[in-house]
Image (cartoon, rainbow, N blue to C red):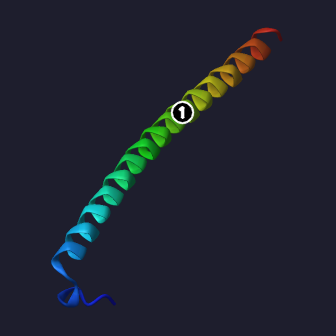
Amino acid sequence: MNRFEAWEAHNLAKFAQEATARLLEQEELIESLQADLKTAIRAYRHLIIERANREQNNTVDSSGAS
């Protein structure tokens, strides 16, 4: 564990700036991944609905052809 009380002020300031920059980068990555996940979920839902509609149409076609 770091003993921050033993650090010099300029080292603490540099560490804080680097940590803040890293947190901002991580936040941007998280937002990007969340957007990707939402896009993937929408695409998956679309495929599921499309498949269900196709299966329903095949069932209607089969029963109507008898």
Whether 23 is drawn above or below 39: the answer is below
How far across and how far down the image is residue 15, in percent?
A: 28, 70
Q: Which residue is mark 1?
A: 45
| In-image side of 64 versus 45 (left or right) | right
How far across and how far down the image is residue 20, in percent?
A: 27, 60
Point out the residue furthest to the top here.
Answer: 65
How far across and how far down the image is residue 41, in percent?
A: 51, 38
| In-image side of 57 versus 1 (left or right) | right
Q: Quadrant of the N terminus?
A: bottom left
Rendered residue at 58%/35% (across/down): 44
Rendered residue at 69%/20% (across/down): 54
Residue type of the residue flagged with mark 1: Arg
Q: Quadrant of the C terminus?
A: top right
Local packing at callout 1 (Cα closer than 10 Å; few below 14, some 14-19, many 20+) is few
Whether 32 is drawn above or below 53: the answer is below
Count of all numbered marks drawn on residues in the image:
1
| In-image side of 44 versus 8 (left or right) | right
Comparing 61 with 13, the one in front is 13
Point out the residue furthest to the right here.
Answer: 66
